[in-house]
Image (cartoon, rainbow, N blue to C red):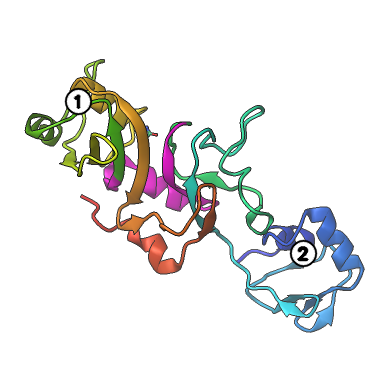
Amino acid sequence: MPKERLDKLLASQGLGSRSDMQKAIRAGRVTIGGTVCRSPADKIDPEDRELCLDGRPIQYRRYLYLMMNKPAGILCVSRDPKVPTVVDLLPAEFRRKGLFPAGRLDRDTVGLVIITNDGDYAHRVLSPAKKVVKRYQALLDGPVGTEEVKAFAEGVKLADGTLCRPAALRLLPQEPGPLAEVEITEGKYHQVKRMFAAVGRRVLWLKRCAIGGLILDASLPEGGCRELTAPEQALVWEKCQ
Ligand code: URA
């Protein structure tokens, strides 16, 4: 892998800001292959020699993959001048440059969001051609039945004439109200809400529960996040149609 400036590289691992890292380096707290390095501008290949901070080895990772349980009221973008975003919610240990949500949820939608700095991975998750399945639960303003299930399976036509791909609609036990589960393989603007609107129903609450075979960790509180393991990262390709 190409060499990078030491201060930049350490900051990219969520160990602190670049100026924090410059101070740590100048204070002699960083070793490269066992030798103290006091020059923040030194260029190194992190896969070449062991890097330690305060004697503790740094497990270098180029990319970070996080699962977040998005709360309502938070924007699903990297930055916004007014409203808090999913990236703003990240704890200090995960904060670093270049993180963004792989896909948008509406401000009032809750549930599973993947946050990463790996553009290729995010692109593949979002690519309509990949047909990654996204599963949602929707609380509706009234019941749906076999007619709506059939309409979704055939491909709903939205109010503006856009034809959606066939989608699986399942009726869930009616608690706490008319609850349905829907699986879609594309990501049009407000898609689930517009699909229900097309069959005469309003979505009162919407949660994304799964992306492919990756299911939202039920132990994550709202606003909580954790790293995805490598097998979990690959689970999103499961059920691709
Ligand atoms: N469909 C919607 O309508 N909203 C979302 O946030 C996601 C899918």
> In front of the other: label 2 or label 1?
1
Residue at 63 percent of width and 69 percent of height: 60
Q: What residue is disc 1 on?
A: 163
Residue at 50 percent of width and 47 percent of height: 222
Residue at 58 percent of width and 48 percent of height: 99
Residue 174 in the image: state x and y as whole percent.
21, 39
- Crowding at dot 2, Cα within 10 Å, few <14 / some 14-19 / many 20+, comes out as many
Quick one: SS at disc 2?
helix
Amino acid under label 2? Leu
Q: Is residue 123 left or right of residue 8?
A: left
Q: CA distance from mark 2 to mark 1?
A: 51 Å
Residue 101 in the image: state x and y as whole percent.
50, 44
Q: Earlier in the sequence, mark 2 or mark 1?
A: 2
Q: Is residue 208 left or right of residue 223?
A: left
Question: Magenta segment: does it hold 114?
Answer: yes
Residue at 42 percent of width and 45 percent of height: 111
Which span is picked out in magenta? 108-134
Q: Name the image quarter holding residue 179.
A: top left
- Crowding at dot 1, Cα within 10 Å, few <14 / some 14-19 / many 20+, comes out as few
